[in-house]
Amino acid sequence: MSVLSEYRNCGLGGEILLKLLELIEQDGFKRVYFSAQKTAEDFYKKFGFSSYGDVFEEVDRPHIMMDKVL
């Protein structure tokens, strides 16, 4: 997920994430996992995600695996 820089820090990313989680739960999924840019780790933690594993490079940027049980 990405938000254009001029729209960051106004809650848009959080709104998008909450809607995605709602739709995922409606479809019956019990867990969400993905690789996140390390710089976004704290953002996702605010929404109940946990990081796990080692930091790794993806598209020339440090990433971490994250998940949330729904």
Image: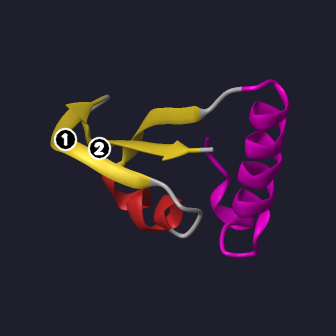
Q: Where residue 7 appears, x then y in whole percent?
A: 74, 64
Q: Residues within 10 Å of mark 1 (few under 14, many from 20)?
A: few
Q: Secondary structure at mark 2?
A: strand
| Amino acid marked by disc 1 | Gly
Q: Nearer the viewer, residue 55 or 28?
A: 28
Cα gap from disc 1 to disc 2, whole angstroms: 7 Å
Q: Is residue 44 above or below residue 55?
A: below
Mark 1 lies on residue? 53
- Residue 20 picture quarter: top right
Q: Tell me, yes or no, whether the two marked residues, 1 and 2, touch with CB atoms within 8 Å.
A: yes
Q: Is residue 24 above or below residue 68?
A: above
Q: Is residue 13 above or below residue 57?
A: below
Residue at screen point 62% across, 45% down: 2
| Amino acid marked by disc 2 | Ile
Q: Secondary structure at mark 1?
A: strand
Q: Residues in magenta? A: 1-28
- Residue 63 picture quarter: top left
Residue at screen point 55% across, 35% down: 32
Q: Where residue 35 appears, x then y in whole percent?
A: 39, 35
Quarter of the image with the C terminus is top right
Q: Residues within 10 Å of mark 2 (few under 14, many from 20)?
A: many
Mark 2 lies on residue? 64
